[in-house]
Amino acid sequence: DYDAVIIATGPLTTPELLDSLKRYISDKGLLYFYDAISPIITFDSIDMNYAFFGSRYKKGSDDYINCPLNKEEYDALYNEIINAELYTPHIDEDLRFFEGCLPVEEIAKRGYKSLSFGPFKPVGLGYDKNNMPYAVVQLRRENKAGTLYSVVAFQTRMKYGAQERVLKKIPALRNCEIVRFGQMHRNIYLNSPIVLQKNLSLKGNERVFIAGTLTGVEGYVEAAASGIMVAHSVRAYLDRREFEPPPDMTAMGLLYRYITGEIKIGREFNPSNINKGLFLHNKERRYSERLAHNALKLFMDYASTIKKYYL
Ligand SMILES: Cc1cc2nc3c(=O)[nH]c(=O)nc-3n(C[C@H](O)[C@H](O)[C@H](O)COP(=O)(O)OP(=O)(O)OC[C@H]3O[C@@H](n4cnc5c(N)ncnc54)[C@H](O)[C@@H]3O)c2cc1C
């Protein structure tokens, strides 16, 4: 008994709600991927004799602590990661991970140097070329007081004992105290191009609108952007007019076109954040400042056009 309802229950939507959604969408309409979070350790347990503060390329504030590793230490860490015992999900299905946030053990499996040339690369941290460590593991401040730090790019599904053994291979973390272990999550999202109408409501029930990461957008900003679009769309629905999405070639407009299936990247519909690739789906060869300026102008024009509906 409602005019319109917005479902924005996110990647960990409860099974009960999913069951009721299944009344309006087919099995093909429901997708999933796995991702994981990193362990969090206490600042007091970090040995600062083997670590130092500083953000990569001096970007942002000094919210990071860097833990350098020589080749021998990297070897020991890498071997421990590769051989770590892993949790497996209870459901019998493929473990599909989000490429943008792979567990550390998945990255390690891709090759010996995948970490030292990837998230543990020692560049941009003030070393001169001849005096670089082999790799650097970064820790990121997790609270205002600076008492808790997460291990960057260490999202993992290792068993708890294994996480402890692995982290203790890092000289600065030999005595680390883990207050929250890394864990894996099963994230749900809809196959939006086949289940959503152009106004972001379900094809199976025009009064049910979907917002947030459930639509296949990925990230905090994107989830919020999706919520804003759906709010405008619901208003249009209640006013009995057509929803006017943000213009193509703006970040929000491109995200909208991605989830409604106008823009296709790859064979399957995968969650996407706002990225330069979306801007290049047209004939644009390169993301440029011109595109960014143009997007801003288009968006401001759009905002002033839709303002009239709210006066
Ligand atoms: C563990 C984890 C860490 C993440 N970290 C990041 C990050 O660092 N940066 C980033 O950009 N993105 C991150 N994401 C991805 C994603 O951007 C965020 O999850 C984002 O908060 C999703 O926004 P949302 O509004 O879609 O859902 P959520 O923020 O998850 O909000 C959904 C809400 O609905 C509630 N809910 C669920 N089921 C029901 C129900 N049946 N009835 C009523 N309420 C219900 C939930 O309790 C929750 O409060 C992370 C995701 C996870 C799972």
Image (cartoon, rainbow, N blue to C red):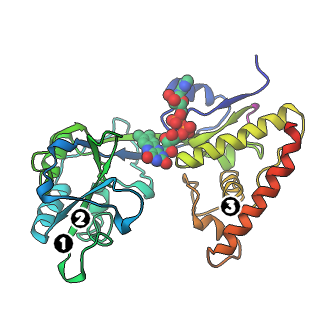
Nearer to the camera, 120 or 132:
132
**Residue visible at 29% across and 52% down in the picture:** 154
* Secondary structure category for the residue under label 1: loop
Q: Is residue 35 left or right of residue 197?
A: left
Magenta stretch contains residue 73: no
- What residue is shown with label 1? 133
Residue 136 disc label: 2
In screen coordinates, is 91 left or right of 263? left
* Percent x, y of residue 61: 38, 56
Return the mark for residue 263.
3
- Residue 1 is tagged as none
Label 1, label 3: how far apart the Cα atoms are? 43 Å
Relative placement, left or right, of 46 versus 22 is: left
Q: Is mark 2 within 8 Å of ligand 1?
A: no
Some atom of ligand 1 lies within 8 Å of the CB belonging to the residue at label 1: no
Residue range in magenta is 203-207
Q: Nearer the viewer, residue 125 or 145?
A: 145
**Label 2 close to label 1 by CB (< 8 Å):** yes
Q: Nearer the viewer, mark 3 or mark 2?
A: 2
The location of residue 238, given as percent across then percent down, is 84, 31
First reached walking from the N terminus: tag 3 or tag 2: 2
> What distance separates the C-alpha of mark 3 from that of mark 2?
38 Å
Q: Which residue does the image show at 62% across and 77% down from the upper left?
A: 286
Report crowding for label 2: few under 14, some 14 to 19, many 20 or more residues within 10 A (C-alpha): many
Picture quarter with the C terminus: top right
